[in-house]
Amino acid sequence: MSSGALILCGLRYYWRTNLAVIAGVAIAVSVLAGALLVGESVRASLRGLVDERLGRTSVAVTGQGFFRQVLGDELKKSDGFSTRFADAATLIAIDASITHEPSGREASRVQVYGIDASFFRLHGVNGVEAPTGRQALLSPGLAAELGAAADDGLLLRVQKPSAIPADTLAGRRSDTSRAVRLTTRETLPADRMGEFTLRPQQEAVRAVFVPIARLQRDLDLAGRANLLLLSAKGDAAPEAAAAERLLNAAATFEDLGLRLVSAQAQHAWVLESETGLLSDSLVSTARSLASRLGFADVRVLTYLANTIRIGGREVPYSVVAGVDPRLYEQASQHTRSPLAPVQTPRPPIWLNAWAAADLQAKAGDEVTLEYYLWSDDSGLQTSSATFSYVGSVPMEGAGGDRSLTPEYPGLTDAPRIGDWDPPFPVDLKRIRPADEAYWEQYRTAPKAFITTATDLWPSPYGTTTSLRIYVTRSTSLDAARNAFATALRNAYTPAVAGLVVQPVRAQALAASRGSTDFGEYFTYFSFFIVVSGLLLSGLFFKLGLEQRVREVGLLFALGFTPARVRRLLGAEGLVLAGIGAVAGMAGAVLFGATILYGLRTWWVDAVGTTRLTLAISVVPLVLGALGGLVAAAITLTLTLRRLGTSAPKDLLSGLALMASPTPKASGTARPWLRFAAGLMLALSLVAASVAGAVPQTAAFFAAGGVLLVALLLTLSASLRRAPAGTIGGHGPMAVARLGIRQATAHPSRSVLSIALIAFATFVIVSVGAFKRGAPENDRDPQSGTGGYTLFAESVVPVMFDPGTPAGRRELGLESGVAAGLQPRVLDNATIMRFRLRPGEDGSCLNLYKPTSPRIVAPARPFVDAGGFRFAASMAANDAERQNPWRLLDRTFRDGAVPVIGDANSLQYVLHVGVGEDFVLPGPGGQPVVLRVVAALSDSLFQSELVIAETQFVRLFPRLEGYRFFTIRGAEGRSTELATALEDGLADYGFDAQSTAARLASYHRVENTYLSTFQALGGLGLLLGTLGLGAILLRNVLERRRELALLQAVGYGGRALGLMVVAESVVLMAAGIATGTLSALVAVAPALAARATSLPIGSTVVVLAGVFAAGLISSLVATRAAAASPLLASLKAD
Amino acid sequence: MLTVSNVTKDYPTPTGPLRILENVSFSMAPGDAAAIMGPSGSGKSTLLYILGALDRPTSGTVTLGGDDPFTLDANALAAFRNRRIGFVFQDHALLPQCSVLENVLVPTLVGAPDSDAPSRAQALLDRVGLGSRLGHRPAQLSGGEKQRVAIARALVRQPQLLLCDEPTGTLDAGSADAVATLLFELHEAQKTVLVVVTHSDVLAARFSVRFHLQQRTLVRR
């Protein structure tokens, strides 16, 4: 007989015990591999969503402004396009709010796509006609949210795009939204690109697809688009660099928002920007290029003066040019000599001949300019400056040169001054016939020239309205233009202009790896199940060995060495573990499918999507199986270790491996010493935490863990110790005590049962303490809401401050329905404004890893008001400690931008801590380093990062205005306030919500994760209970002779049952009490910090369930005992 | 009085009932003692268990003091055994987790309350020579000592019938003799009906009444 045959015999003969060992390993592998499978499935599902939502789009070109719609077609025709790309489509993509007219339902943060047939062609979607007229195709999610059906009317509110920044004089600050009326044609299914989005998100997409022509018409964007999609050709790598090369070649000045206007009279070209202002960096580049080409240049900053006054004489509404007219003349003549300084008491001013005559100006006269200045804080204010009149400028030269002023829609294109449609107040009564005559003849030719314009009218967008490139008379204008334009296009690339090529598919696939590794999380969550499985496996293996202890003794007696016996039994164990691992792989699929089902249903709040499906993959299964095998091998090795230490005679008599029935002397104090030692260590950890040496949470959890181990050791010692009293008396209590005494017969088994239950109870109770409820007081400035009861977001930037009476007047909130109904609601409200850079949700609501999260920047009053609760900060002085929001003002030598985020989002989603950096792709693709200076505790800012307004304006100058608001109203009137603001600012797509509701949505995610953890902890607890049941059953079967004896001396079935139940109850109670007590220590800071109590109800329900399972196990064991022929075991023959 | 009348016992087997005992009849008065002998598998223990109301006869009756235990329900039967019958088994069957005193007291935890039980247990243990080892566990006792504890346990309820199944079967000669002497002394003191099943001729020789089980029937020698 070979060793193999011996092993096989053992496997076959002890099949019942072996089955239990296999089951234990299978459970461990199922859970371990299943957890990894869940992680892989979540990633695969997110990848699947990316594929479905991006369709064939691999690269996207997005701009801060709009480019020519034909750019896509031109790209397709360019050399090299077809080698890498299959198709291109141009779209208009904008944010909107939408109203479903039949029901009045509204949805905000809707993505509107202006498309044509090229969109469907690019994505290979056949059978769907592009929308025409006023047709709208809705994404399934939006259609469901609105309850929209075919032919239903829709009202879209969007921001009317404007190239001119709203926070400049010529920018529009009111009447900035447009309503677009549409009719629902159909819901576009997801497989027909109905869920198209460039932003990785797992939640349902709110999108509406409309004819691009409709948007172009309604938004005055004829021939323009702002999104270009490219699809990769076949398997060609979707290389963003290739797209960038093609774009660099195809993009025109118009695409980059620039224009070169001819000024033939001056033999010059004028470089202007659609925004009305050329950035300083562009001007610097262009001047350098002009100089290299031998062209003279002049920078001009023009502005509108409300009044030019000398004494009592004045000229209304005149263009003032910020240029020295002598420089202008020099450049025209291509001469450049140093200009003689003008010696005047005030800054010099020149008037053109017309104005000088009109004002009867004389050299030295004091000239006053009055003009508007826009400030986000105080709105439009009139300011003035005084100058000394130097002289007049002839109308034939600079004085009559209308090309000095760029085009401003609504102004420069008006036939009469009276037809102006300016974004600022104009008193038309001041317009004289002479002014109209001037306009008719000279249009925007400046009436005054100054040299201090950049000081008077600074702007973050630049201080140059036009750059004039003077060409020598000997050079043709066209040739000069070509030379200059080519050089400038090479230097000023689309990327520099903000036309960014994004490898959206690669980015989305990278993001689909997720901010949360679900495999890792579920491995943590399932830790106790894995441990329970392995402990049970080890327990059954040990029980099997005990069953075979005489056989082992016989092998020793026959000359087998302990090592040989260990190898034999170890080989048996490994075969069992192997079978268990294979079974576990099948179980892993079941476990994974169950967890994913849970994530789609019971725990959907944690993931916010029902689109997660199981993806069976070999790698996680094999990894889980290997992990389980290794853990099982270690468990078996530890169990077999004792074999060699037992004498053969003990083995043959069955004494070895059995728990020692001889107790320790009853007088020993060791159990209490163990407890005291553990308690001391736990108290030391708490003291270290109080002293600040160890983080509070870690210290208390460690203290709880130490206490748990100390209690288990104490119980272990107590069970091994002779009991103090004698079991006497009579009746159920006495019988129960006899049952409880059984726990001391096999102390290690009893401690194992207690430990399994205690560990799982520890998890359930401690996790339960972290569940969050509604904020206790949403008006508390030191709470997560900062005392703001509402927050709001608008589709269209709000340029006026709704928190001030003046701002409310400008916004029309002082009149109309809203104000009329609740005149005092708005007066008593505190409204804080934030600038907003849209981006990915940075909170736990987003499963994708955000690379470009939403950013908000509060106006100064918010920072000064302080408030909110901070979890950590870099505060270094009292002022910063008192109000950590001031940390936003910090400057770092390396240029990093201070940022504040919510502690949860920073830790679990962005994975950065205080003092660490997060790199954000900047507006032109350049990285921006954000340094975390403080972390908010459980705040309403979990979806966004907060930076200083000054930094925001510097980084994102084109994102003007305010779109995010925190609002505090009179107590009990939040709903009225929200309604008043939403109604009054409906044109802005203003959507206000309760901050408590927002916090609750975050808490739901957190609580759901905790519930998941608890549920899996509960499963571990159930396994522990089953282990307890197995131990009880084993004990009962081992004690058949004892039980038979008890029957013989008059114990009935009830008494025997009571004994078994009493033992299990005590073991479970010990486990639950140990786990609960330790957990309470671990979570004490959390309970204190939140001033909340444990969710006793749910915890008690779980623990009661465990108790019930334990009782059932005991009863099963009792029944098994009763069913076995007890009396036969007493017979001597 | 123990009265056994025409007791027959069959065990079911796949090939039909297997008869172990056939028309066994005898009676014993308080203070009587008898040994039952016979080869292995002859049905000695089966008869003893029927006498102790642990097993039912297929036919026939057993009465103790005129009461037929097999007419009782399960609870009453358990109480009957508890109050009126004492058992001593070959393998002492002590509870390893309980002390010597607790083992003796085990039968008093159920059944009718008995306030004198602790003092009686103490007295019995003094009588069997283990009065100084009340707190010891069975693992700390020798085989003979364990069996003495088992005898004390069997008598703690002052039963009418004391049944012993090979009480000296696992003991050396010296211990066996000591246990047997003790058994007789206590039997004499409590005037029980004593029935002992044994293979031991030495032990059997100490009984004036000896039965042999041969061919399923009981023969007095």
Image (cartoon, rainbow, N blue to C red):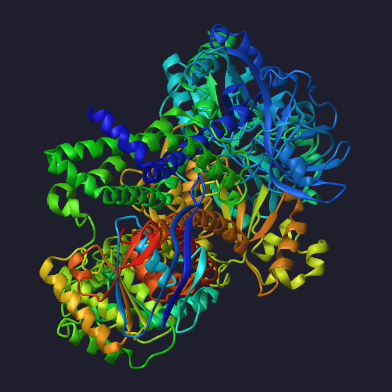
Q: Is residue B155 above or below residue A452?
A: below
Q: As rendered, which of A28 and A64 lies closer to the eye?
A: A28
Please state, as top left, top right, bottom left or bottom right, where the N terminus of chain A lies in the image. top left
Q: Is residue A103 left or right of residue A936?
A: right
Return the x and y of residue A778 as percentages of the image width and height. 58, 69
Confirm whether residue A735 shows in the render. yes
Residue that appears at 59% across and 10% down: A478
Return the x and y of residue A949 as percentages of the image width and height. 50, 52
Q: As rendered, which of A445 and A649 lies closer to the eye?
A: A649
Residue that appears at 63% across and 42% down: A610
Return the x and y of residue A316 as percentages of the image width and height. 71, 47
Return the x and y of residue A369 as percentages of the image width and height. 61, 49
Q: Is residue A699 left or right of residue A1106?
A: left
Confirm whether residue A1110 shows in the render. no
Query: Image quadrant of residue A662?
Result: bottom left
**Residue placed furthest toward the front:** B221
Query: Image quadrant of residue A940?
Result: bottom right
Please state, as top left, top right, bottom left or bottom right, where the C terminus of chain A lies in the image. bottom left
Q: As rendered, which of A106 and A385 lies closer to the eye?
A: A106
Residue that appears at 51% across and 23% down: A331
Q: As rendered, which of B193 and A473 lies closer to the eye?
A: B193
Question: How many circles with numbers are drawn on the protein?
Answer: 0
Q: Is residue A281 above or below residue B187?
A: above
Q: Is residue B195 left or right of residue A66?
A: left
